[in-house]
Amino acid sequence: MRKLRWAMDGGGFWDLDVSTPKTLDGLACPVPGDSIPLGLSRGTKLSRPKQIDFMQRFMNAPLIPSYDKPQGFNLQRVLTIPFSDNWFVTFLGQFNLQRFISSVRNSGEKPGSVSSRLKMLGRHLQQKSLYALGCWSELLLTPDDTLLFGVDVYGDTKKPRKKAVLHHKFPHHDLTAEAVWPSLFVDTTGSYWDVPFSMAIDFASVATYDSDVSYHLSMRHNSGSPEQFQCSQHQISRVPSTLLPGLSIKSAFSYKKRSDIWRSEARKLKLVQPYDLFLSDPNVSASGIIGIAATTCLGDNSARALEDDRQSSKGLFLEAFGIKSAFLADVFASVSFTAQHGNFQRLFLDLTRFQARLDFPSGSRFLSGAKCLTQDLLNSQKPSLDAVQAICPNATISFQQQVVGPVSFRVDSGVIVDLKNSECRVQAHEPIFAIEYALQVLGSAKAVAWYSPKRKEFMAELRFFET
């Protein structure tokens, strides 16, 4: 869930938190792109401790598994202590099963009696590297204000992670303030980075099904020298420019239009509740988004961001070398198509859902490529590969199929078009495979077990009121 960035997550331009088993709270921030737009909107979701607590209480799952390479398989369990109606503390414990098995096998010990075997297992269980503990305190200040403090402590050489989050709900907006030290980021190659201290404030309009206009205003401050996370699969010498120390202020304004091409008027089965109310109407629809985004960078992150932007985007940019600052702006657009068959009521194959989305992250780059391509065609010249590449959008596809009852299979993947690669011009980008279990009693909620072949990660999560 990228939060896993499903294709439905609102246009694909905002930097939503990425789910990952590498941290106890199950989150990492995406490295903001060097080109525009640079959204920072924080997609709200149930915290990791609450998810595991729900699975333990209502899904008879005493231990929740997760996997990431090279750490291996982990088992998690929580203990929730409610101190009052508006304040509770949660302890999340994690045990590394694969590391424990490897430790026993590599010890070379050959115990004979049952007591000696138990002693051997006890000695291995005492290894601190097998354990991690997270403690979160969540306080409901008012019905609209939530304050969260958390700390993760790891038994090996990892530094403890601390987090403080304040979330306020306005009638039509969400305000989130967050400080994390160190903060974990993940880039497009699947590499993870630790930033010693990161603070973010985000103010965003609340999107609804039929809302047309939305806007985001956000600010992020990073300090300290970023380091590549020790469990990253790829060793990269260059630090992503947007993680360097400095302040970035970002704003985005967008207009969305949705149109139903066809919607079924057939009656649903009587006295049969759909497994998911949000997926109970067969339809064919299309939607489009167009907007403008601007970023102001102050600090070490400004020069590198501008340097990269010259190569990737032709949007408006200004710079002031004396005070290490830069301003970038560009337009963006997105077009999506969705088709669904079935009401998700019957026991077998009553839901087939497909979505395709085309994202144009830089309008100026698209127009520049279209201009060059038109000139080549008018002059009867062979079109430039760079011009054709510039007008190719970023594509994302999503397919979901009910298997039996509330269980469905889903795959989401990006599609990359690289015309300069003669061997394979079209490639799948970070596919995500998932099994979803609809929690029918909650109207629209599901437990999801997903696997990412690129990141070699597996997690079980809960998602509420999402399509």
Image: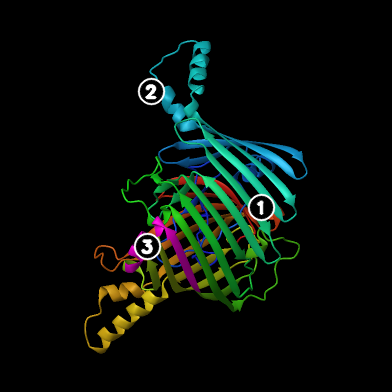
Q: Say which residue label 3 marks.
A: 322
- Which mark sits nearer the N-terminus, 1 or 3? 3
Q: Nearer the viewer, mark 1 or mark 3?
A: 3
Indicate the position of residue 244 as horizontal and vertical percent values. Answer: 41, 53
Q: Secondary structure at mark 1?
A: loop
Residue 133: quarter of image:
top right
Q: Considering only order in the chain, which callout, 2 or 1, is on the residue closer to the N terminus?
A: 2
Instruction: Tell us which disc is closer to us: 2 or 3.
Output: 3
| Separation of marks 2 and 3 at Cα, in angstroms | 58 Å
C-alpha distance separating marks 1 and 3: 57 Å
Q: Is residue 226 magenta?
A: no
Q: Please state the horizontal and vertical placement of residue 25, each as a whole percent of the image.
A: 56, 44
**Separation (CA) of disc 1 from disc 2:** 43 Å
Residue drawn at x 65%, y 38% is 90
Answer above or below: position of 52 versus 243: above
x and y percent of residue 410 in the render? 51, 57
Residue behind mark 2: 106
Q: Nearer the viewer, mark 1 or mark 2?
A: 2
Residue 18 sits above or below residue 280 on the image: above
Residue 418 or residue 35, whichever sits in front: 35
Q: Earlier in the sequence, mark 2 or mark 3?
A: 2
